[in-house]
Amino acid sequence: MSFNPFKPVIHNIQAIFNSNLQTEKQRKDDEQECLQFGICAVQAQSPRPEELYFG
């Protein structure tokens, strides 16, 4: 079996791809919790600081 010089690069790409999938899944889970249960981690920000937001 010969050494494949692209194997480490392929593993790095796979690791990045898998971490992006996990991040996307977590984001969708958080959005779903927010929609279903009102448990929202994202704070709404007003475009003007003098406005109060009651969410």
Image (cartoon, rainbow, N blue to C red):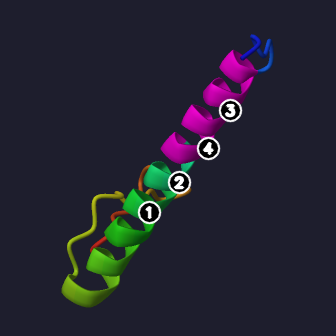
Dot 4 falls on a residue whose secondary structure is helix
Label 1 sits on what residue type? Lys
The quarter holding residue 17 reads top right
The image shows residue 5 at horizontal and vertical percentages of 80, 12
Q: Nearer the viewer, residue 17 or 49?
A: 17
User: Which residue is at a point 77% across and 13% down the rendered structure image?
Assistant: 2
Dot 1 falls on a residue whose secondary structure is helix
The quarter holding residue 35 reads bottom left
Distance of label 4 from label 2 (alpha carbons)? 6 Å
Is there a contact, CB below 8 Å, between mark 4 and mark 2?
yes
Q: Which residue is mark 4?
A: 17
**Position of 36 relative to 13 (above/below):** below
Q: Which residue is mark 3?
A: 13
Label 2 sits on what residue type? Leu
Secondary structure that dominates the magenta span: helix
User: Which residue is at a point 27% across and 74% down the rendered structure image?
Assistant: 54
Distance of label 3 from label 4 (alpha carbons)? 6 Å
Label 4 sits on what residue type? Phe
Dot 3 falls on a residue whose secondary structure is helix
The image shows residue 45 at horizontal and vertical percentages of 44, 56
The image shows residue 37 at horizontal and vertical percentages of 19, 84
- The magenta span reads 7-19
Q: Which mark is residue 25?
A: 1
Q: Residues within 10 Å of mark 1 (few under 14, many from 20)?
A: few
Distance of label 1 from label 3 (alpha carbons)? 18 Å
Q: Which mark is residue 21?
A: 2
2 or 3: mark nearer the eye: 3
